[in-house]
Amino acid sequence: MLLRIIAVLKFLKAASLIALSVGVFRTMHQDIGMRLEHWVRAMHLDPGNRHIEMFLERVSNLSPAQVKRLGLVGLLYAGLFLVEGTGLWLQRRWGEWATVVITGLLIPVEVYEILRHPSAAKILVLIVNTAVVGYLVYRIRTNHETG
């Protein structure tokens, strides 16, 4: 049951990244800064907020090649999430191992990000990912010992 819940989370992450990547590719030859500023205003966020301003400035300076790379990286990660989710959904040992390795490799990066710029969301992601890895390692070890 828990494997299926983790699989669904992986599928949701993959779907989100695919949608985001498609959106990124669609803006490749447009003024991304203007488009994002429109979305910021539509979501009633303050475009004068220094964090939003910095984000808009950084995104506005991306070249089409950088935008393309960003979209491709998103699709690569989506592919990894689909592999993990499929393996977990089918309750395959390789899916458990893939999730342990891929998710486990990201934990040090998450810790680093929390140390640089702490936020409740980042801490929650770290807790969930650590729990997933811990659960899967426990499951792999227990299933190996019993059969």
Image (cartoon, rainbow, N blue to C red):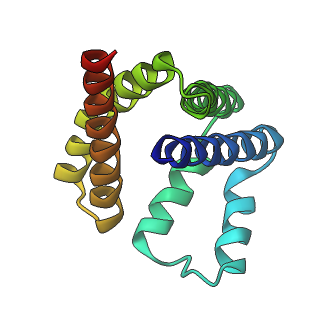
Compared with 8, 145 (above or below) is above
Residue 129 is left or right of residue 73, and the answer is left
Q: Nearer the viewer, residue 107 or 66?
A: 107
Rendering coords of residue 100 (x, y %): 36, 27
Residue in the picture at 28% in, 29% down:
137
Name the quadrant of the C terminus: top left
Rendering coords of residue 119 (x, y %): 28, 64
- Name the residue furthest front: 146
- Name the residue furthest left: 115
Residue in the picture at 24% in, 17% down:
145
Residue in the picture at 48% in, 16% down:
94
Residue 2 is left or right of residue 120, and the answer is right
Compared with 47, 91 (above or below) is above
Q: Nearer the viewer, residue 84 or 146?
A: 146
Rendering coords of residue 111 (x, y %): 21, 44
Q: Nearer the viewer, residue 83 or 29?
A: 83
Quarter-wise, where is residue 72 in the image? top right
Compared with 95, 26 (above or below) is below
Rendering coords of residue 56 (x, y %): 56, 59
Q: How many marks?
A: 0
Quarter-wise, where is residue 41 in the image? bottom right
Compared with 143, 85 (above or below) is below
Residue 81 is left or right of residue 138, and the answer is right
Residue in the picture at 46% in, 18% down:
93
